[in-house]
Amino acid sequence: MSNNTNRRSFIGFSFAAVAAAGAVPMLIGMKKAWDPLPSVLAGGFTEVDLTTLKPGNPATVEWRGKPVFVLKKTAEMESSDRDLIVGDDRFTVAIGLCTHLGCIPAWKKTAWKCACHGGQFDASGKQTFGPPPRPLDLPEFGLKGNILVLGETGPEYKKLMTAKV
Ligand code: FES
């Protein structure tokens, strides 16, 4: 092998080593820039402690910029195939946007009423009056004991989606 070939190989290897050494930090920097911020990741999930809810008095929590209604049903409220059953309690979990044109219905003792065009949803989130074409939508959720985790897709959510309630 000539001196020229050895020199060329050495220069080639040196160039490759410098390029590789420079590429690693660049790729790490690019990955950091593309990964969602921790605040964004945390924003995808909202936890609700179901033990804090009073029967018949729904909580409204924010999840991914939308209101979500979580109602612990009273014994008098009708059972529904949309009920989330936790222990002896029944809950309604629904996105709080009217399925007509997206207004936020207000809770009026036993039902959610939409001020925009008079739509009405019962305590299970089913439309009972006015122009809404379907029940309140279900948010993705999971359960960790008594904690409702909005943003997860737990078996309870999948069961309701399979039942097309
Ligand atoms: S937006 Fe609720 S009834 Fe029209």
Image: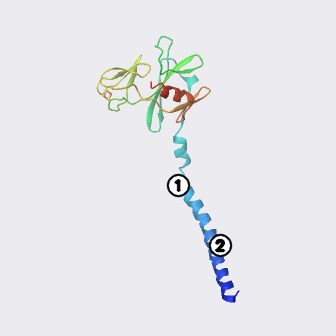
Q: Quarter holding the N terminus?
A: bottom right
Viewer-side label of 1, 2: 2
Asked if 39 appears above or below 103 in the picture, the reply is: below
Q: Which mark is residue 62?
A: none
Residue drawn at the location 50% of the way across and 26% of the way down: 160
For the question of whether residue 143 can be seen, the reply is yes
Find the residue positioned furthest to the top: 76
Residue 148 visible at all:
no
Seen at 52% across and 26% down, the residue is 159
Ligand 1 occupies quarter: top left
**Relative to 116, 37 lies left or right:** right
Q: Position of residue 105 (x, y in %)?
A: 37, 26
**Which residue appears at 52% of the width and 55% of the height?**
34
Label 1 or label 2, whichever comes before in sequence order: 2
Q: Residues within 10 Å of mark 2 (few under 14, many from 20)?
A: few
Residue 154 at what x, y percent from top left? Answer: 56, 31
From the viewer's side, name the closer residue of 121 and 105.
121
Residue of label 1: 34
Taking depth in this image into account, of 165 and 109 the one nearest to the observer is: 165
For the residue labelled by badge 2, is the local secondary structure a helix, a strand or a loop? helix
Q: Which residue is mark 2?
A: 17
Report the residue at 59% width, 67% height from top.
Answer: 23
Q: Amino acid at mark 2?
A: Ala
